[in-house]
Amino acid sequence: MLRIDLTGKRAFVAGVADDGGFGFAIAKALAQAGASICVGTWPPALGIFTKLLERGKIDESLQLAEGGKLEFERIYPLDAAFDTLDEAPPEVRENKRYKEQGDFSIRGVTNRLLHDFGTPALDIVVHSLANGPEVRSPLLDTSRKGYLEAVSVSAYSNVSLIRHLAPLMRPGGNFLSLTYMAGERVIPGYGGGMSSAKAALEADTRTLAFEAGRRHGVRINTISAGPWASRAASAIGIIGPMIRYCKANSPLPRELEGPDVGYTAAFLASPMAAAITGTTVYVDNGYHTMGMAVVPPPPEPDPTAEPQA
């Protein structure tokens, strides 16, 4: 039987703070394939996440298909807006949700992994990070600050993770990120520079596949997932209509589910995908192939019709 086997592999998933996002779905799929899982969590959400785990509030979500339960080998604080702790301004470092966490930068996570596991320490790194403070604003109305923050956390942080963590990877290592169709086509309502960030993420995937492949022998891919009502996606404000529209207009008229993305990630992280790099893999029920909506627009009003009382 041909099956995905990640036994003995260690994954680091950056961007897990609850059981409702693609990062969690990927972590769960990797664990089902046998990998051990470390995660990086945004410091302001870290306390809530650990309490959910300690109190058994998400135990049902942690159950694996073949028995057992998803357990996290380590949970590290991570704010991917900062490559080093020195880059964090004093008001962040002194914030009560940050100051007890130690070094929460990307370099800080790298040093913790080195301390806990030595090197080589990793086989799989997943970038499940995005932040668009002005995501509800049209791009035309987005401030420079909001635009740069969206690109910094949603795209550049992947460059930084690869630069810092590629030297810790075992042979055959794989990096994976999550993108969205808005990087290629107009999605009204997906603003604040997030469309630009996703376009950058996809372009970087190709360039980094070459550079990091030659320098470190690792693979770099990204998954373009369809809309899913995670807590982060709900911040967009139009996630419900996005899901309904994609379901109605995709070749497979079904809603996307977390395992759809998780299983694809497990495949890409496995030796079965050893020749796949620099690629955007679509997991969207085929929506990206469509050039015209299946559901017709409502009929135009007849200007000659008598008004209804």
Image (spheres, grey):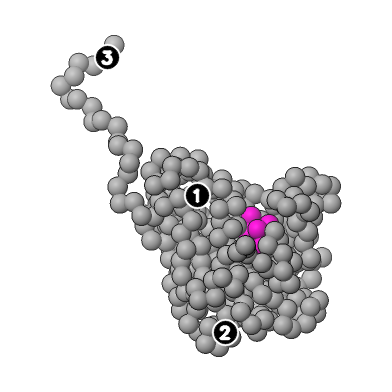
Q: What residue sits 41% from the left and 40% below the top?
A: 248
Number of callouts: 3
Q: CA distance from mark 2 to mark 3?
A: 70 Å
Q: Earlier in the sequence, mark 3 or mark 1?
A: 1
Check disc 3 and report its element: helix, strand or loop. Answer: loop
Callouts 2 and 3 close, C-beta under 8 Å: no
Residue 123: which numbered mark, if any?
A: none
Check disc 1 and report its element: helix, strand or loop. Answer: loop
At which x and y percent is residue 34? Answer: 72, 64
Callouts 3 and 1 close, C-beta under 8 Å: no
| Nearest to the observer: residue 154 or residue 38 | 38
Residue 308: which numbered mark, if any?
A: 3
Q: CA distance from mark 1 to mark 2?
A: 32 Å
Residue topped by disc 1: 227
Q: Vertically, is 217 above or below 248?
A: below
Residue topped by disc 2: 217
Q: Earlier in the sequence, mark 2 or mark 3?
A: 2
Q: What residue sits 62% from the left and 77% below the top?
A: 173
**Is 132 within the magenta?**
no
On the image, which quarter does residue 130 sit in? bottom right
At which x and y percent is residue 210? Answer: 48, 82
Q: What residue sits 51% from the left and 66% below the top?
A: 222
Front position among marks 2 and 3: 2
| Nearest to the observer: residue 191 or residue 69 | 69
At which x and y percent is residue 245? Answer: 42, 42
